[in-house]
Amino acid sequence: MNIYLDIDGVLLANNLHPANYASEFLEHVLTNFPDSTYWLTTHCQGDATVPIRHIGHLFDDETVELMRKIKPTSWDMTKTSGIDFSKPFLWFDDDLFSGEKQDLINNNAIDNWIEVNLTKDPDTLAKFISSFPIPI
């Protein structure tokens, strides 16, 4: 299964602070999916070092080393163009554009988007660790 991760609103609560349990969430994801976790964020367009340069200073050295395992994606107008729909996946993101939502619907994959709403529940990532979603 592929895991796709956004940064803003998922791993970061804001520009200055990681989300609660972000390090533990990354450890869980990268322990269980070390070869199939991808950046799906505006901060990564084919270069996996850019997200680390963008947010690495906010995390401890162990978490940054884990982040180095995350593979890059490239996409055009919508993040969904960076998703491999031929494989089961989960996409952790805080918001979808209408075109992205339509792409997921068209591919029978809307339930593979895992909405992260840190405003509503700042401890959302902890819940994913204890009860990890399964793609439909």
Image (cartoon, rainbow, N blue to C red):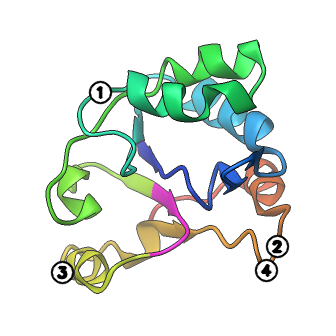
- Does 31 appear above or below 136? above
> Disc 3 and disc 4: Cα gap in Å?
28 Å
Q: Is residue 25 left or right of residue 122?
A: left
Q: Is residue 2 left or right of residue 21?
A: left
Secondary structure beneath label 1: loop
Secondary structure beneath label 2: loop
> Disc 1 and disc 3: Cα gap in Å?
28 Å
Q: Amino acid at mark 4?
A: Lys
The residue positioned 23% from the left and 32% from the top of the image is 46
Range drawn in magenta: 91-95
Q: According to the image, label 2 marks what residue? A: 121
Q: According to the image, label 4 marks what residue? A: 120
The reply to whether callout 2 and callout 4 are in contact (CB within 8 Å) is yes
> Disc 2 and disc 4: Cα gap in Å?
4 Å
Name which of mark 3 and mark 2 comes first in the sequence. 3
Q: Amino acid at mark 1?
A: Asp
The residue positioned 79% from the left and 36% from the top of the image is 24
The reply to whether callout 2 and callout 1 are in contact (CB within 8 Å) is no
Number of marks in the rendered image: 4
Name which of mark 1 and mark 3 comes first in the sequence. 1
Could you tell me which quadrant the C terminus lies in? bottom left
Q: According to the image, label 3 marks what residue? A: 106
Is residue 128 in the magenta section?
no
Is residue 93 in the magenta section?
yes
Front: mark 4 or 1: 1
The reply to whether callout 1 and callout 3 are in contact (CB within 8 Å) is no
Secondary structure beneath label 3: helix
Front: mark 3 or 4: 4
Name which of mark 2 and mark 1 comes first in the sequence. 1
> Disc 3 and disc 2: Cα gap in Å?
29 Å
Q: Amino acid at mark 3?
A: Asn
